[in-house]
Image: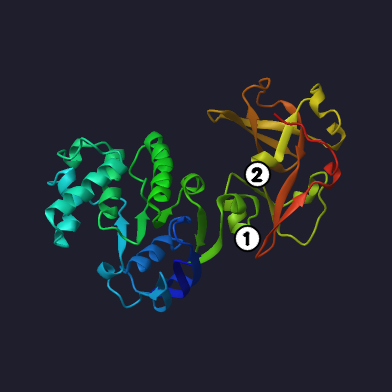
Amino acid sequence: MYVELKHIHKTYGSYKASEDINIGIQKGRLAALLGPSGSGKTTILRMIAGLETPDSGDIIIDGRRVNDISPAERGIGFVFQNYALFRYMTVYENLAFGLEIKKLPKKEIKERISELMELTGLQGLEKRYPNQLSGGQRQRVAFARALAPNPSLLLLDEPFAAIDAKIRGELRSWLRDMIHKVGITSIFVTHDQDEAVEAADEIIITNKGRIEQAGSPLDIYKNPETPFVAEFIGESSKIDGYHQLKGFEKGSYKGAIIRPEFVESFKSDNTKFKDIINHSEEGTIEDISFRGNCLEVKLRVGDILLTTHRSLERRPVAIGERMHVIVYRMYAYDDEKSYLLENKELIGKEMVTF
């Protein structure tokens, strides 16, 4: 592992910001620290950077314990949420600042900046000031400035928070491509799961100062290990009486989490579902919301409220309409773990959805 945190603890008074943190990140990977506000993700990032000191445990970068090494000597580039660009310096001067402090020759500085401008797509903007740039361009400048001194590790604190939604989506792909092109190990903090899923090679989920789960975006989405992860990732309906639904038996679980993609609703005349209609139950549409590429439909089945997504290509439905409803699977949970449950009545049946 290129970056390792071993048994890290950090408290502020009686508040446990980090409790027995153990993570490892491979060289050249882009990892996301994902969690709600106050979950401890920024504290972890700041301890790696040397801006905070752990109460106990080891921080290791490239095989070297860095707990007692100053931030300037750790070889880290840092991109702040608000860019932290110098307002009265041009783009060129912002990029040159750190290199000039290191007293590099002017020719070398010029060559390095030219390389970075091309890498980040900022050619022609050398003489502009930050207030003459778009949010996306300012973020690219902040990224280029962090890369200027050739750091061994790049840290980014909520790098897309100050950018509008459309540009934010474009920058996610851009950042991922740049990280892989440069080959620098990188860690970014976010509370936005879409950012983490789309940009990161690995996601580390934090909650109340602890690590809930770490793994690839696909693995975490499909195999949540804890109740928190099952509910936090994706869109979910948390229910108690899961055993009331056809195909599921009551176990020793406290409850269950059902995602929209686990639910199908249809009318009696839909022949695509003729083989499984006997395994369905009746529900009533309580709410319909337009989500751009689909409809979000809320259905009441007994005393359980479920959410599903409906393609815009299917026939329109209305609030109050009665529907057949099937739940394919769910995540049941106890105090510590979550478990994938499949609808027993549908085993061996062919599902046809669109």
> Residue visible at 71% across and 43% down?
304
The CA span between labels 1 and 2 is 15 Å
Name the residue nearer the viewer: 288 or 106: 106
Q: Left or right: where does residue 63 sit relative to residue 201? A: left
Identify the residue under disc 2: 259
Identify the residue under disc 1: 226
**Would residue 86 be seen by someone viewing this image from the given angle?**
no
Q: Could you tell me which secondary element the residue under label 2 belongs to?
A: loop
> Residue visible at 58% across and 46% down?
234
> Residue visible at 45% across and 51% down?
191
Q: Could you tell me which secondary element the residue under label 1 belongs to?
A: loop
Quarter the C terminus occupies: top right
> What amino acid type is highlighted by mark number 2?
Arg
**Would residue 287 be seen by someone viewing this image from the given angle?**
yes
The quarter holding residue 17 reads: bottom left
Q: Residues within 10 Å of mark 1 (few under 14, many from 20)?
A: many
Q: List x then y, in percent, for residue 219.
A: 61, 53
Q: List x then y, in percent, for residue 230.
A: 62, 53
